[in-house]
Every structure is written in C-alpha cells, then in structure tokens.
Amino acid sequence: MFLIEQNRGDAGPGIGQAVARRFAREGLPIALIARSEATLKALDLGAARVVTRVADSTDEVALRSVLDEVVREFGVPDVVVYNAAIIQADAPGDLSVRDQLDAWAVNVVGALTAAAHLAPAMAERGNGSFLITGGMPEPKPQYVSLSLGKAGVRTLVTLLDQNYGSSGVHVASVTVAGAVAPGTDFDPDEIAEHYWRLHTQPQHLWEQEFLYSGSGMSGLGPTVAA
C-alpha cells in the first residue's frame, strides 16, 4: 500500500496513520510518502514492513522519483491512498491567484500525478485500488479553495474510473463530512475501515464515492466498470 500524506493547515489528525495501520494489519507492506521527516516519524506502524520517502506532492519530479523507488522495493501497488489537502479558511477573494493554484496543486494535481504514474501498471496487471480522501460534501463560501479542490477530486475520480475502471482498477473517494479526531463521531480508525472496505469490494459493487458523515453514514451509489 502506498500512502501519500500531505495535509497542511488546520487538518484533523489521524486519517493517514489510521489507514496505514489498517492495511498493515492485513499484512500489506506500506510505503509512506510525505513532505517532511516529521510527518513520517509521527506515522508509527509498529512492526509492519514499511519504507518511508520524503517528497512534496506538488513537485512532479520528486513525487515520480520516489514512486519509482518504492515500486522497485515492493512492486506495483495493490492500493494507493492519496491523503493530501490544504485545509484553510478562505472567503472569496481572500487568496491570491498563486495561493489558489498552490491549494489546487495539493488538493487535485498531486493525485492526478500519482495516478498517471501508477494506475497504468495497475491496469495492465488487472487489479488494484486508487483511493482519494475527499471532503466538503457541499461547497462553503468560508472554505473556497478547499471546496474547489474537493469538487475537483470528485471529477478526477470519475475521469480515472472512466480510464482505468474497465481494466480492474477501483478508483474511489472517501468524503469525510466533519473534523476528524479520535474518540468522536469522526474517529480516524472508524474512517479507515471504509478505505479497506472499498479496496476489498467486489467489482460489481464498486462505489465511486463513500460519504462518511459520522453516526449517519451512506455510500453515494455503486459505480461498475464497463
């Protein structure tokens, strides 16, 4: 399992670590990619087989390079989880064009880069999952850049599914509709179960987006590859 972790701003803690622990429990080797050593050190997976690499998801050359390194180490991944976002409050006009583009690069383009680099080999093999952490079920004017980014994630998931789904690659997002914190209705360990569930879904039951809304949860309908 390849986990690309790059949350910035006032992000709720724990989804990345919880997802990595969940997949490690199933015996999968784990490759952790983050933009800082500090983030990697915080992802404690115990005795699991783990490799770590530092790369910024917006640096195409660096990201592709470390993805190649971990493919050489573990082979083509069974599952890739893109858990990267800039989470910040910004109203219309608050951010400069440069800041909006920086947010878009993390929220959407990094996922596209990773998918373009890894999904063709997964499709050639005939199976695998590419899962993206979503959010913002409805756009909010106090979170403009994040609302735009998460809308972009939905479109990206649809496009990737259209391109790779028929070859056996399950592309989906987990939309988290609240602030993540241990011991709450948005406990990261509970959320992580749905990443594993999506990864192991039979193809005829594939969901393209799963909405996690705390105590009331609902999938947003199955998408079956043609």
Image: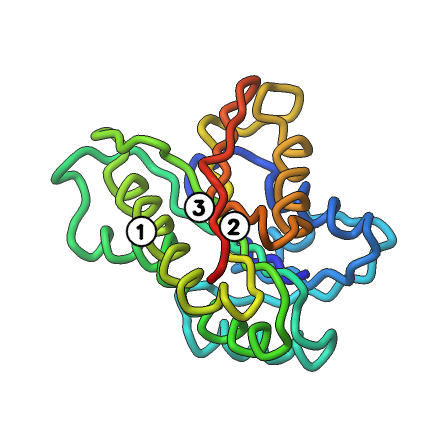
Where is residue 68 drawn, in percent x and y? 59, 80
Q: State which tag comes first along the sequence, 2 or 1.
A: 2
Mark 2 packing: few (<14 Cα in 10 Å), some, or many (20+)?
many
Q: Hey, which quadrant is residue 4 in on the image? A: bottom right
Q: Residue furthest left?
A: 93
Q: Which residue is mark 3?
A: 8
Label ID, residue 83: 2
Q: Is residue 198 above or below residue 10?
A: below
**Amino acid under disc 2:** Asn
Where is residue 210 drawn, in percent x and y? 50, 38
Q: Is residue 102 left or right of residue 47?
A: left
Q: State which tag comes first along the sequence, 3 or 1.
A: 3
Image quadrant containing the N terminus? bottom right
Gap between marks 3 and 1, in whole Å? 18 Å
Between circles 3 and 2, the one closer to the viewer is 2
Mark 1 packing: few (<14 Cα in 10 Å), some, or many (20+)?
some
Q: Is residue 110 visible?
A: no
Q: Is residue 162 above or below residue 141?
A: below
Q: Hey, which quadrant is residue 102 in on the image? A: bottom left
At a point 57% along the width and 35% down the height, the residue shown is 13
Q: Which residue is mark 1?
A: 152
Is residue 92 or residue 108 the one in the foreground? 108
Q: Is residue 94 left or right of residue 18?
A: left
At a point 30% along the width and 33% down the height, the residue shown is 89
Gap between marks 2 and 1, in whole Å? 14 Å
Count of labels in the image: 3
Is residue 219 or residue 32 the one in the foreground? 219
